[in-house]
Image (cartoon, rainbow, N blue to C red):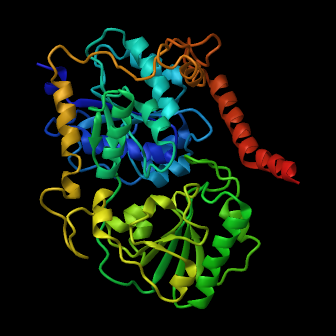
Amino acid sequence: MPASATKALRVAVLADSDTRWKWGALTANRIVPQGVPRDVPKGLGTAVQEDAQEDAQEDSPEDSPEDSNFRLDGYLLRGRATPTARQLQEVGVRADSLREVTAVEFLRTMSEETEDPYDVLVLALVGGGVQAMLHGLNRVWGERTDRPAVVTGYVGVVYEKLADGLLLRHGADLVLANSRQDADRFRAVYDGVGADSSPVTEVALPFLGGEPYTGEHDPYTVVFAAQPSVPESRRDRTYLLDRLIRHARSHPEREVLLKLRSKPGEHTTHIEELPYQKLVQKADPPPNFRLVYGHMGEVLDRTDLLVTVSSTAALESLHRRIPTVVLTDLGVREALGNHHFVGSGCLASWDQLDAGHRPAPDAEWVARQGVAPGGTPSGGTPSGEGSYANAFDTARERIAKLLARPGGLPPLAPYYTPQTAPGYLPGILARHHLGPDGTPLPGAPAADRDPGPVRQIVRRAARGAYRHGVQRVAPVIRRMGEL
């Protein structure tokens, strides 16, 4: 009988940013097989390496299901986008333990998990990080058959580097696709290069939910969901901010909110060189215009019109049947990501919105995105085959079969190997201080011991300096080079 059938399941999530931590932890809650009693109090926060992260753990709301039946350990991969305490609190996802690690530290931890190994490991990383971990894990696990089932995927809309990102994720036991459309595309890429496409598993975005939109609020609230890197130029970002402020001025009876992902100096999945907080200092917004942070779900609770360039927030909004607009003001372009919404019925410009236009989403397009499937009307409850409530059933069933597999699990088998990609793979692994065979390179950080107090202080200072360089110095140098 497999160990997972006689004990509470243990799940680990390795994430490299706030949004990927949210996706990874919520995905774990959705896909872990049900029916196994949990062996620790739900939401208990322990072993948090950073005391600031500990504060975030204690104060964060409970997003995990009431019937959580497993222990969730979170690992934050140290880098430019390692989430701050405020970002962790805003994400609002609890774990039983949470600590920051380097790639080598994480691999060492996985190698030491032999007496009571994890059952499921979710890799919530960029493609290169996933590939590095797959090769590193193969090295530390060797021929072990009691290894965890390894799961990976994407945090949102996949609109660029489809083949590159997918092949870097190949080798995991499950590669999750957030919609029927993505599942078809993923399989086509894998089949097209002769890679095994069976790990592709259709699910949905794990953070969809909330009460369906039932009608206008008082005051009527317009929310612009900003993105850290879309658009990139000062001119385009200033234009969007100006149009939002103009909308607020022309509709003084409305509340107009600029929903921001991070505060200056913080990093998310993408680098934000020109924060809207700075741009708005040079504007003169009216009293009904405000900047807001916080959990996107809570903001959507009071939203009557969601406007964005291409944020995943549009899918959250559509799932609730909130009127949703994807802007065309800057064009419909791959660089902006709004080309993904072609056919959605949601494309419109600020001029159209100011004139009172409200797009109606295309039901077939929405269903293919795994958003509000079933076509229930506003205020209705999705039910039956294909509903969001059933979107994760297949993933749960596949993981249950993996955990019950006679003889355990075979070694991971990534498409990229030193034989298939000798000019590409070594560079990917080296970024995480790993050699071509997954072995830590000489001088890899913390390859031999846990960091002491002094090393932890130096790391925090170095990370702060690095973020300052990326956020403040690098943009100035680039602008000077354009003169």
- State the quadrant of the C terminus: bottom right
Above or below, 169 relative to 83:
above
- The x and y percentages for residue 248 are 59, 84
Q: How many marks?
A: 0
Residue positioned 54% across, 77% down in the render: 349
Using residue 124 as the reference point, say whether residue 335 is left or right of it: right
Residue positioned 47% across, 80% down in the render: 221
Can residue 206 be seen in this snapshot?
no
Residue positioned 50% across, 14% down in the render: 418
Residue positioned 36% across, 77% down in the render: 360
- The x and y percentages for residue 416 are 45, 22
Q: Nearer the viewer, residue 199 or 243?
A: 199
Q: Nearer the viewer, residue 440 or 318?
A: 318
Above or below, 475 relative to 216:
above
Using residue 301 as the reference point, say whether residue 35 is left or right of it: left
Using residue 376 as the reference point, say whether residue 214 is left or right of it: right
Above or below, 184 relative to 230:
above
Can residue 16 be seen in this snapshot?
yes
